[in-house]
Image (tube, rainbow, N blue to C red):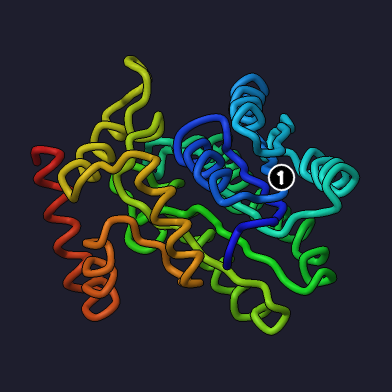
C-alpha cells in the first residue's frame, strides 16, 4: 500500500518504534498522522514536530488498557478525520518474571499487548471496510514467533498479537483489509534498555538473550523496513533476518528447539 493521502493512526507514538513510524510515514505525504500515547506530552511533541514539517498531525492521550478510552478515541478520530485508513497498533508493555509474575502485571500485559489491538481493530476496521479497504500493522515481537526468556507474560501476549493478526488477515482479506505483524528482536528503546534500577534478574536474562541473539537496530531502521514491507504487502515484518531462520527451526523441529532454548537459558543464567 502507498501511504500518500492516507489517514494514519499510530499508537505508542511518543517514543521508540512508534515515534519512528510516525516520523517515517509523515515523509510519505499522508493526509494526517494521529499520534496516540498514554504519554500526553510525548505524543503532543511528536505531533507538533510533524506539523512543523508540513504534515497535518494531532495527538490524542489514551490509556490503551482502558476499553472506554479506546472507544472515545475512535469517536474523536472519526469526528476530526473521518476515520482511519492505516492503523499502527504499536503500543506495548513488558514485565520480567516467570510463573511468579503478579496478576496485575498479567492483566496489564493482556490489556495493552492483546486487547488494545483487538479493540482498535473493532473500532476502526468496520470504517475501513465501508471506505473500500485499509491496512493494519500490529506490533508484536520476535517473542511472538519464538519466546522470550525471563518474561513469560510478554512472550504469551505477543503470541496472542501474532494470532490476532493472522485471524484478521484470513477473515478480512476479502474486505481489502491488508495486515502485517511487526516482529522485531533487539531495538534500541526503553523496553530493551530500561532506566537504571528498573531491572531485576528476569529483566537482565531477557535483555541478555536478546543482545546475544542478534544486532540491536535503531527505531528508524525498523520504521524504514515497516514502510518497505507495507509497500510489498508482506504479512510478517522481520527487521532481523535471523528471526526467520529461528522461526523455521522452531516450526520444523519443535522438540529440538525447546531443548536448545533450555540449554541457552541455563548458559545465560550461569547454571
Viewport quadrant of the N terminus: bottom right
Q: Is residue 17 above or below residue 133?
A: above
Give the image location of residue 31, x and y in percent.
72, 49
Q: Is residue 199 above or below residue 95?
A: above
Q: Is residue 133 left or right of residue 53?
A: right
Q: Which residue is mark 1?
A: 32
Figure disc tally: 1
What is the quadrant of residue 11 in the picture?
top right
Element assignment for label 1:
strand
Q: Who is closer to the viewer here, 246 or 203?
A: 246
Viewport quadrant of the C terminus: top left
Outermost residue, front direction? 54
Give the image location of residue 263, x and y in percent.
12, 55
Query: Which residue is at a point 61% across and 71% down the rendered structure image?
Result: 178
Query: Which residue is at a point 40% across and 34% down the rendered structure image?
Result: 191
Q: Is residue 52 left or right of residue 226?
A: right
What is the quadrant of residue 258 in the picture?
bottom left
Q: How crowded is the residue under tag 1: few (<14 C-alpha within 10 Å), some, or many (20+)? A: many
Query: Which residue is at a point 19% across and 49% down the rendered structure image?
Result: 214
Q: Is residue 68 left or right of residue 255?
A: right
Q: Who is closer to the viewer here, 97 or 207?
A: 207
Query: Which residue is at a point 63% across and 26% down the rendered structure image?
Result: 52
Q: Who is closer to the viewer here, 44 or 121?
A: 44
Amino acid at each position: 500500500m502507498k501511504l500518500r493521502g492516507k489517514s494514519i493512526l499510530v499508537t505508542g507514538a511518543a517514543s521508540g518504534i512508534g515515534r519512528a513510524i510516525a516520523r517515517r510515514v509523515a515523509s510519505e505525504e499522508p493526509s494526517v498522522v494521529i499520534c496516540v500515547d498514554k504519554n500526553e506530552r510525548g505524543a503532543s511533541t511528536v505531533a507538533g514536530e510533524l506539523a512543523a514539517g508540513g504534515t497535518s498531525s494531532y495527538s490524542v492521550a489514551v490509556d490503551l488498557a482502558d476499553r472506554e478510552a479506546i472507544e472515545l478515541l475512535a469517536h474523536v478520530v472519526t469526528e476530526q478525520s473521518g476515520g482511519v485508513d492505516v492503523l499502527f497498533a504499536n503500543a506495548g508493555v513488558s514485565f520480567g518474571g516467570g510463573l511468579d509474575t503478579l496478576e496485575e502485571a498479567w492483566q496489564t500485559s493482556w490489556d495493552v499487548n492483546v486487547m488494545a489491538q483487538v479493540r482498535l481493530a473493532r473500532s476502526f476496521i468496520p470504517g475501513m471496510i465501508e471506505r473500500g479497504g485499509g491496512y493494519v500493522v500490529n506490533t508484536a515481537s520476535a517473542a511472538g514467533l519464538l519466546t522470550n526468556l525471563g518474561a513469560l507474560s510478554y512472550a504469551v501476549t505477543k503470541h496472542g498479537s501474532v494470532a490476532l493478526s493472522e485471524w484478521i488477515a484470513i477473515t478480512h482479506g476479502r474486505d481489502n483489509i491488508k495486515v502485517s505483524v511487526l516482529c522485531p528482536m533487539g531495538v534500541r528503546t526503553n523496553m530493551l534498555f530500561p532506566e537504571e534500577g528498573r531491572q531485576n534478574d528476569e529483566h537482565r536474562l531477557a535483555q541478555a538473550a536478546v543482545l546475544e541473539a542478534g544486532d540491536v537496530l535503531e527505531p528508524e531502521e525498523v520504521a524504514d523496513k515497516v514502510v518497505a514491507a507495507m509497500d510489498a504487502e508482506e504479512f510478517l515484518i522481520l527487521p532481523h533476518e535471523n528471526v526467520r531462520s529461528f522461526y523455521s527451526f522452531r516450526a520444523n523441529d519443535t522438540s529440538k528447539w525447546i531443548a536448545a532454548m533450555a540449554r541457552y537459558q541455563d548458559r545465560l543464567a550461569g547454571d
